[in-house]
Amino acid sequence: MIGINEVVKVGIAQMDVAKQPNTIRTSGLGSCVGVVLYDEVKHIAGLVHIMLPDSSLGRMQELNVAKFADTGIKALIDLLKIEGVQTFRLKAKIAGGAQMFQFTSDKDTMRIGPRNVEAVKAELKKNGIPLVAEDTGGNSGRTIEFDPATAKLNIRTVNRGVSEI
Amino acid sequence: MNFHQKITALHLDVLKEIGNIGAAHAATALSDLLNKKIDMRVPKVEMVSFNDMMELVGGSENVVVGIFLRIEGDAEGSMFFVLPIEQANRFIRRLIHDETFDFANFPVSELGLSAMQEMGNILSGSYLSALSDFTGLKIYPTVPGLSVDMFGAIISIGLIELSHISDHVIVINTSILDDEFEDKESVRGHFFLLPDPDSFEAIFKALGVA
């Protein structure tokens, strides 16, 4: 965390935390959802790159908590607590959950984007974290970067340009 | 259950052979379609983490043309045909006789998209029918979908099934390339076959290496 304007990069099914003046970023979100939890007073933010809605779907011996909406959001809250953030001050911004390919298949896998978004929202609600802004759905990939100093989430897409929420 | 601990060197060779036969048929089909020589590289079978998977085509943010289909039947999995923009442009320009066509210009022309879609149909069809002939497995591909977007956003749909049980993926990766291009990683097209974890057994059994 030394240096100026470092970008903390978060990979798929991973999470991390960044403090002002650093920013935190994850790239190539398709059906996955990037969840940012931030504290506007302390200028700290955490980001988790979620792949699946529910850890009960997992059939693994070792659970990667950051992969699932339910366990990922909880784990991110815990990580932020270690940084001295109080849960009641946390707010959320989310992006992703696209459906990259449009075709008919009864497989649930094809609807994974919307299901991830629903699961993330339910989990935020359960933890009493207000969802301030979202850019979800559609059929575009997204790269997102959050700046804890301004609490703005920058969203870059290939065919819809750049936006900020 | 930890499916990849049971995979031996012989298994990897068998998977490599699948990649070889499948992609060779697809490369021939592509060569016929474009009436030009297409080179193919020796297939690689690798077990990689999800994040390393993103690096196989220049990082998760790299914009590519991606064809994706699901395989259903005796063996299930996901298949991708991924082309860097530069390579895809050359193929489609040649196919539709339009030198101005560009996947990087949004909105991309309908004619170009439908030519790409058709190319995806033909190539994945020849890859998979070779695979089916070789293994004797009955497999049914879905109609391929097309997307021009970030590689990470495209490939992650193929990781969903696996991600229920693993953070790693066994990827059968064969690259092809227009022989007029200098061979560099950034212009190679890739066939990625990602069998679902439960399907490895069926594949190995069909080939007598279970």
Image (spheres, coloured by chain):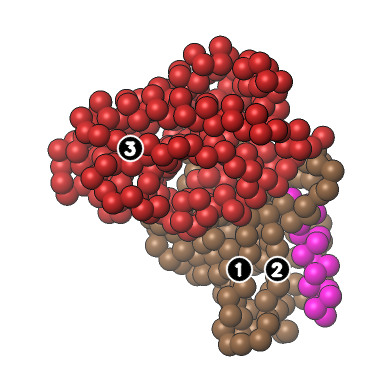
Chain colours: A brown, B red
Name the residue located 77 percent from the left edge and 52 percent from the top edge: A64
Residue B195, given in percent of the width and then of the height, sits at 61, 31
Q: Is residue B14 left or right of residue B29?
A: right
Name the residue located 67 percent from the left edge and 66 percent from the top edge: A47
CA gap, disc 3 and disc 1? 36 Å
Q: Amino acid at mark 2?
A: Asp
Whether the residues at callouts 1 and 2 have beta carbons within 8 Å, the answer is yes
Residue A1 visible in the displayed image: yes
Q: Is residue B201 left or right of residue B89?
A: right
Q: Is residue A134 above or below residue B113?
A: below
Name the residue located 28 percent from the left edge and 51 percent from the top edge: B182
Give the SS element for disc 2.
strand
CA gap, disc 3 and disc 2? 42 Å
Give the SS element for disc 3.
strand
Residue A141, given in percent of the width and then of the height, sits at 49, 53
Within 10 angstroms of label 1, few (less than 14), some, or many (20 or more) residues? some
In the foreground, B41 or A48: B41
The residue wearing badge 2 is A16
Q: Quadrant of the N terminus of chain B?
A: top right
Residue A33 visible in the displayed image: no
Within 10 angstroms of label 2, few (less than 14), some, or many (20 or more) residues? many
The residue wearing badge 3 is B39
- Magenta region's main secondary structure? helix
Q: Is residue A18 left or right of residue A30?
A: right
The residue wearing badge 1 is A9
Does mark 2 fall on the same chain as mark 1? yes
Span colored in magenta = A68-85
